[in-house]
Structures are given as structure tokens and as C-alpha cells.
Image (tube, rainbow, N blue to C red):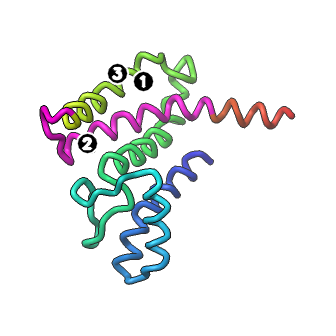
Amino acid sequence: MISTAVALWCVLLVLAPLLAHMDLVAPSGILYLFFSKICHQQASRSFFIFGKQMAVCSRCTALYFGFLFGTLLYPLLQRTMKDLQPPKILLLFAAIPIVIDFSLGGLGILENTFLTRSITGLILGSVVAFYIIPGLKNIFMEFSKK
């Protein structure tokens, strides 16, 4: 169920430029407007599909698709993991590259690139899934008890 919801979210990211490419302005505009509330959508920092800008920037795209990858990987690794949630230090280590990339760019020390934004987003997005999924499972179990 979680993987399906995340996959749908990722499909919407790709659907916006696809609809724009097909000259379906109203539906694509709704998607772009929706995603504008959570991402700056700067064209210079975004991937393009069919010559149209993705609904979110490259870092956000990588975070979301990384999270999708993590949700698909979670059931496979859950069987081998003793604890359902890895140690919190792993989350910190996964966040360090994106913080460094963002900070160096923000401070004007070193400009981040599509590659650095994408790799750091994929790393963090993939790892975050292993913390979000157990939490969501606990919430669903609590609601099902009531």
C-alpha cells in the first residue's frame, strides 16, 4: 500500500511534463501548481522530459524516486533485519552528503550540480524509507486496534 502511494506520487511527477508535451495545459498546470507548493521548480535545477520541465527540481525528484526505491527494497531487507528500523546513526550518515552539498552551494563555496543533487537525494530518499515505513506500520496497527 505504501509503495503504491509512493509510486503514484512519482508518476504524477512524470505525468506533469508528459501532459504538457501533449498540450494538455489545464491538467499539467494543476500538477505544476500543486508541486510548486513543495518545490521551487527552478528550470535551471530541474530535469526535462519531452522538452518539458519535471514537476519538481532534480534534488526533489531524486529524493522521491529514492524513497520509492527504498519502499520497494524494504520488504526484501526486512526479512533479514533483526530490527524493523535501522539505527538512527544511519539516517544521520545518509543526510550528511545532502547537507554538505546544499551548504557548499548555499555558501557559494562549491556549486552543486545535477549529479551531486541527484546522488545525495537518492541516498537520503532511499534510507528515509526504512524509518518512515515502520512508523506508518505502527500508526496503521494502532488505528486497527481501535
Placement of the C terminus among the 4 image quadrants: top right
Residue 130 is inside the magenta segment:
yes
Q: Nearer the viewer, residue 124 or 44?
A: 44
Q: Amino acid at mark 2?
A: Arg
Question: What's the mark number on residue 91?
Answer: 1
Seen at 51% across and 23% down, the residue is 80
Q: State the image coordinates of residue 54 (x, y, percent, origin top left).
A: 34, 62
State if disc 1 and disc 2 touch (CB < 8 Å).
no
Of mark 2 and mark 3, the one earlier in the sequence is 3
Label 1 SS = helix
At mark 3, the secondary structure is: helix
Horizontal placement of 81 versus 44: left or right? right
Q: Which residues are magenta?
A: 107-135
* Residue 35 position (above or below residue 15): above
Which residue does the image show at 62% across and 48% down from the upper left?
Answer: 1
Return the mark for residue 117.
Answer: 2
Crowding near the residue tagged with mark 1, few <14, some 14–19, many ≥20 C-alpha atoms within 10 Å = some
Q: Is residue 58 above or below residue 78?
A: below
87 drawn magenta: no
CB of mark 1 within 8 Å of CB of mark 3? yes
Q: Position of residue 13 (x, y in %)?
A: 42, 60
Give the residue pinned by disc 3. 93
Tell me if mark 2 has few (under 14), some (14-19) or many (20+) residues whose alpha carbon lies within 10 angstroms of its own.
many
Image coords of residue 75 (percent x, y): 54, 36
Mark 2 → mark 1, Cα distance in angstroms: 17 Å
Which amino acid lies under the numbered mark 3 shown in the image of this protein?
Phe
CA gap, disc 2 and disc 3 = 16 Å
Element type where label 2 sits in the image: helix
